[in-house]
Amino acid sequence: MKLLEELAPGDKDRELALTLDPAKIPAHIAIIMDGNGRWAKRRGLPRVAGHKVGVNTVRTTVEDCANLGVKALTLYAFSAENWKRPATEVEVLWRLLRFYLRHELEDLQRNNIRLQSIGRVEALPERVYEELRAVERATARNQGMRLNLAINYSARVEITDAVNTIIDEARIGGKLDSLVVNEKMIAQRLYTAGLPEPDLLIRTSGEMRVSNFLLWQIAYAELYVTETLWPDFNRTELLRAVLDFQRRERRFGGLAPEQETGAAAGLNEGDGEQEMEEIAVSSQ
Ligand code: FPP
């Protein structure tokens, strides 16, 4: 874990990082960055001040995740619904995104990070779109962590687009009549095709919602909600989230290994009558 090399002995984050199991670092972390507006309001500042500090948190979180050995990090930067915000706030968000792209390119290259956007980015103001594409092209060959920025993103639109692509492909191939869509076909046409699904979904600011984010991909993600507002999220918080993730028992709909043998024990072939009676007796 490169992170340990960065942390001096005695640093509390180093102590925390040492408690992590390096073999169980989540391959993909997704984050709903929330609470910028509240952070600013609590300080009597305009909302955009929270977004500004939030960019700094983006910078440090990207670097920390790369140093932890995370393979993919997906950040929810702008949802398809965020257009409903005042035009001035949306404008500031685009300015901040451009600022981030310009100032971070060097760091992304140094850390071998590949930046990609996910979402309908063609709808962005042209200059923002061009700069985004330029950074995507410039980092396209980087083999380290993949950084997905979800911008003008909606999971429902993503899934609908994937299904329509499948239909179009079948139509072009003259196979529409016999088309049967399966999960693999959809997954391969999502923005995240080829990436592992998120293992851990972090949401800041305490809201218990998934807000139309990666709905398909988070089917088995572990959820971690912290009260901390995005501008205050830091390395300690990230390490706590990963530690919490490592303590969870992931079963993907199955049973824990120690439960598996117990569940099968004592069951005979039959029509279930006996089992129902046993359950009724044992639950009395
Ligand atoms: C949610 O806070 C945050 C956003 C809608 C935008 C996130 C954007 C950034 C962190 C900055 C730009 C991003 C990049 C990648 C450079 P909110 O405004 O909904 O907060 P509130 O719920 O407290 O009002």
Image (cartoon, grey):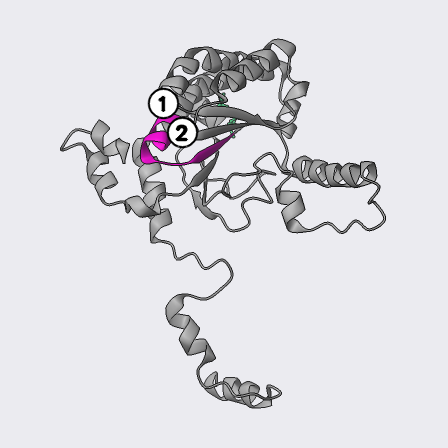
The residue identified by callout 2 is 144
In the image, 224 versus 245, the foreground residue is 245
- Which mark is drawn over residue 80? none
Q: Could you tell me residue 220's position as x and y percent? A: 51, 51
Residue at (51% x, 84% y) in the render: 279
> Residue, x 65% and y 23% (percent of image)?
83
Q: Nearer the viewer, residue 194 or 150?
A: 194
Please name the residue that numbered disc 1 is placed on.
111
The answer to whether any part of residue 234 appears in the image is no
Q: Residue at x 24, y 40 (%)?
A: 16
Location of residue 166 (image quadrant): top right
- Residue type at tag 2: Gly
Q: Indicate whether 284 appears above or below 56.
A: below
Q: Please indicate whether residue 32 sits to the left or right of residue 231 in the image.
A: right
- Indicate which disc, 2 or 1, sits on the residue closer to the N terminus: 1
Which residue type carries mark 1? Asn
For the residues labelled 2 and 1, the Cα–Cα distance comes to 7 Å
| Mark 2 element type | loop
Residue at 46%, 30% (x, y): give it. Answer: 146
**275 sits to left or right of 104:** right
Q: Which residues are magenta?
A: 62-75
Residue 193 pos. (x, y %): 58, 38
Q: Residue furthest left?
A: 10
Mark 1, other Cα within 10 Å: few <14 / some 14–19 / many ≥20: some
Proximity of marks 2 and 1: CB atoms separated by less than 8 Å: yes
Whether residue 275 appears in this view of the structure is yes
Residue 255 image offset from top left, x and y in percent: 45, 66
Q: Nearer the viewer, residue 116 or 200?
A: 116
